Image: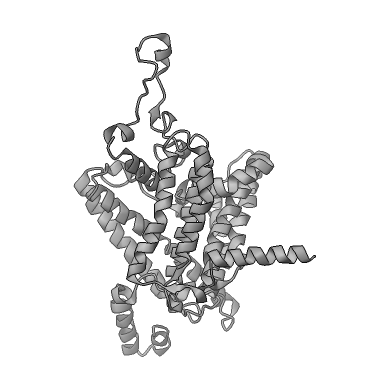
Amino acid sequence: MEWVATSNEFIHNVCRTIIPPPAYRIPVKPHHLLHLAAAVLPSVYMAYLARRPDTFHLRLALLPPIALVTLGTFFRFKVPGAEYIASNWAIAMFSILVVAKDIVWAWRPEGMLKVGEEKPGVLIKPSNQSRGTLSHSANDTRMSPSRGKRRSLAWLYDALELIGTQRGIGWKFGVGVHIPKEHRSLGRSVFLRQTLTSALRNFVVLDACESLIKLVPGVGSPGGGTIFRPELPILPRYILSTAVHIATGCMFMGFDLLYDLFALVGVGLLYHDPSSWPPLMDHPWKSDSLHEFWAKRWHQVLRETFLVCGGSIGGAVAGNLGVVFGTFIGSGLFHELTVCSCGQGFDPQGMLFFVQQAPLLVLEKLWRHFTGYPVQGIYGRLWVYFCIVILGRPLVDSWHRRGLGGSYIVSPRISPVRLLLIPYLRWFTEALGLQCISVLLN
């Protein structure tokens, strides 16, 4: 049908106007940072509106143009060079995350409320007030601390406070979110020292994992390659693929590194209370069930985003079961679209790992229903390792086949592993006559 073809062409042209192919994007220069910073300002205004009452319809009206400005600006630029795919991936992830946050802030009629608020910035009146024990005028409202402390800059403080919260600690949308137990001292100076140590440790782990991945033929090149090396026998092939998968997973300590750096700024420069910066993850390798892994031990930074952008749609269709499936479908789309938008093509395997988590969680529920015992203990931990390490390898393979393993996260100019450790190991193995190992270190 001609009108269908015309409609599809129109939609395609609109999408390509907003998100052009990488070949048509502008190589980013330092002065372009002003353009990128300006593109975030409408989202700051959206956050401000979410902390003001009676702005629901205005937020809904502004959501489409704000989303178009954000995507259209960030996808107008690129970091040139195949070795910087990870940088473009980060830019895409940030822009899509900003739009997802805009959706979260726009869709709630009441706005974004803190715990104890009945309206943005207005605390719930005590129950005994209705009995006459407190005397207030009819127009009196109790302001939340963030509004009362900084009246002159309340609008900016409210917006930045909402933007800065990711897990919703102290907010209604964060009620029930698992907060890992703090293992650092809450004394300011000791907290800063321990956080700096944690940041350095996470940097070294990130650098080591990235450097080792780049030693794998194909995988470590910008052109990409499979983690299942066909020239190897079956057993070494799967040992190597598992090692690359684990190293890729450990690279997510980069999130811990960023979190540590933000904590250093928040506590060290902005004088935040150290208790407001609890750990990001809760030792995910100790999980005894998939439910524990995803609901508690893995980071909860994007929990609300996936619930709103996927879980709410699934919940409207199929109730609680739909929330679970919709949340993981939303997660899969988020991760895959960020890679796809960098010009690496759409790969269903990039979504499969996330989507399959929903039925695996349902299986855990059924196990408990029919046996009366929860998934736990050593067998539960083996089950988690199977679901994450074994079933997760196609996801990592999809990423590395599209060149993410060959791009730089840590620049070689500041990499201690590539500047010091690998050259030393190369010299040491050559001195021992282990040429087969020395070649791998080139």
Quadrant of the rendered image containing residue 187: top left
For the residue pair 158 and 287, the one nearer the viewer reads as: 158
Rendered view: 154 above or below 119: below
Q: So how many labels did they put on this image?
A: 0
Name which residue lies at 22% across and 50% down. 269
Name which residue lies at 53% across and 42% down. 107
Q: In the figure, is residue 365 to the left or right of 24?
A: right
Color theme of the render: one colour
Image spot of residue 374 (x, y percent): 58, 42
For the residue pair 168 and 122, the one nearer the viewer reads as: 122
Q: In the figure, is residue 137 to the left or right of 390?
A: left
Image quarter in which the C terminus is found: bottom left
Q: Residue furthest left?
A: 189
For the residue pair 138 and 433, the one nearer the viewer reads as: 138
Rendered view: 335 above or below 398: above
Quadrant of the rendered image containing residue 9: bottom right
Image spot of residue 293 (x, y percent): 50, 50
Name which residue lies at 62% across and 51% down. 358
Q: Residue furthest right?
A: 1
Image quarter in which the N terminus is found: bottom right
